[in-house]
């Protein structure tokens, strides 16, 4: 189909083949349809990612709330300290912020105050990793031995390193060593023996 137009003194002759025009329109529609489908997939992926992020934050907040609730002192201050410590620990270990928050709760339930729990968090996370055990067990072993030998939190990293080294260089693992220490530690401590 040929169309001729005259605009003012300038004459334009436009030849348009209807078949090519329809083919071009179909091509544009197909491309836009593909973009719409791709956009839906990308948008869905973004929505899932945002949902996961919101759940992760909610899980962290719940874990930190639990830890702050069982710790003496100002709840809000403990909450903020625990939240910052859990996020910091998660950035440098295999454990998530939620799991770090749960470890803080375990430490608080073992009788540590907020400052002590924060100080003990990274050594306990590293200890759990080295012993290939969950945080509840690692915290239990660490705090039981620390309490039995009347050690302070500043001595905890050296104690955990020593336990890890002992397990690595003997025919045992940290879980078995921790179980043995439940029986040996109170007796040894009562006789003024050190853990080393």
Image (cartoon, rainbow, N blue to C red):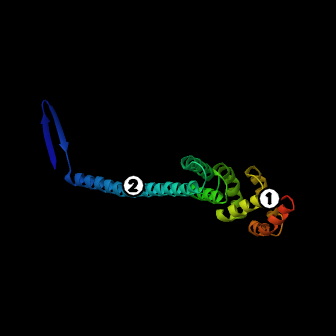
SS label for mark 2 = helix
SS label for mark 1 = loop
Q: Which mark is residue 43?
A: 2
Q: Which residue is mark 1?
A: 149
Residue drawn at the location 39% of the way across and 55% of the way down? 43
Residue drawn at the location 75% of the way across and 59% of the way down? 147
- On the rendered structure, is 112 left or right of 14? right
- Cα separation, mark 1 vs mark 2, equals 56 Å
Q: Residues within 10 Å of mark 2 (few under 14, many from 20)?
A: few
Q: Quadrant of residue 138?
A: bottom right
Please name which of the two marks, 1 or 2, marks the residue nearer to the observer.
1
Q: Quadrant of the C terminus?
A: bottom right
**140, 46: nearer the viewer:** 140
Q: Is residue 130 visible?
A: no
Q: x, y (%) of residue 56?
A: 51, 56
- On the rendered structure, is 59 left or right of 7? right
Q: x, y (%) of residue 168?
A: 80, 63
Residue drawn at the location 55% of the way across and 50% of the way down? 75
Q: Residues within 10 Å of mark 1 (few under 14, many from 20)?
A: some
Using the image, determine if residue 192 lies above or below residue 10: below
Q: Earlier in the sequence, mark 1 or mark 2?
A: 2
**160, 23: nearer the viewer:** 160
């Amino acid at each position: 189909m040929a169309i001729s137009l005259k605009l003012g003194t300038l004459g334009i002759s436009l030849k348009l083949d209807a078949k090519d025009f329809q083919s071009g329109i179909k091509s544009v529609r197909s491309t836009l349809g593909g973009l719409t489908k791709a956009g839906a997939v990308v948008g869905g992926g973004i929505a899932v990612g945002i949902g996961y992020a919101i759940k992760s934050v909610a899980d962290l907040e719940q874990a930190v709330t639990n830890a702050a609730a069982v710790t003496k002192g100002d709840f809000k201050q403990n909450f903020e300290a625990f939240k910052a410590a859990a996020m910091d620990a998660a950035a440098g270990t295999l454990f998530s912020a939620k799991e770090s928050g749960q470890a803080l709760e375990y430490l608080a339930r073992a009788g540590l105050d907020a400052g002590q729990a924060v100080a003990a968090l990274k050594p306990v996370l590293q200890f759990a990793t080295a012993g290939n055990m969950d945080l509840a067990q690692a915290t239990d072993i660490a705090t039981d031995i620390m309490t039995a030998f009347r050690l302070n939190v500043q001595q905890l990293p050296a104690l955990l390193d020593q336990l890890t080294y002992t397990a690595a260089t003997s025919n045992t693992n940290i879980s078995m060593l921790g179980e043995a220490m439940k029986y040996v530690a109170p007796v040894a401590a009562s006789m003024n023996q050190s853990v080393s």
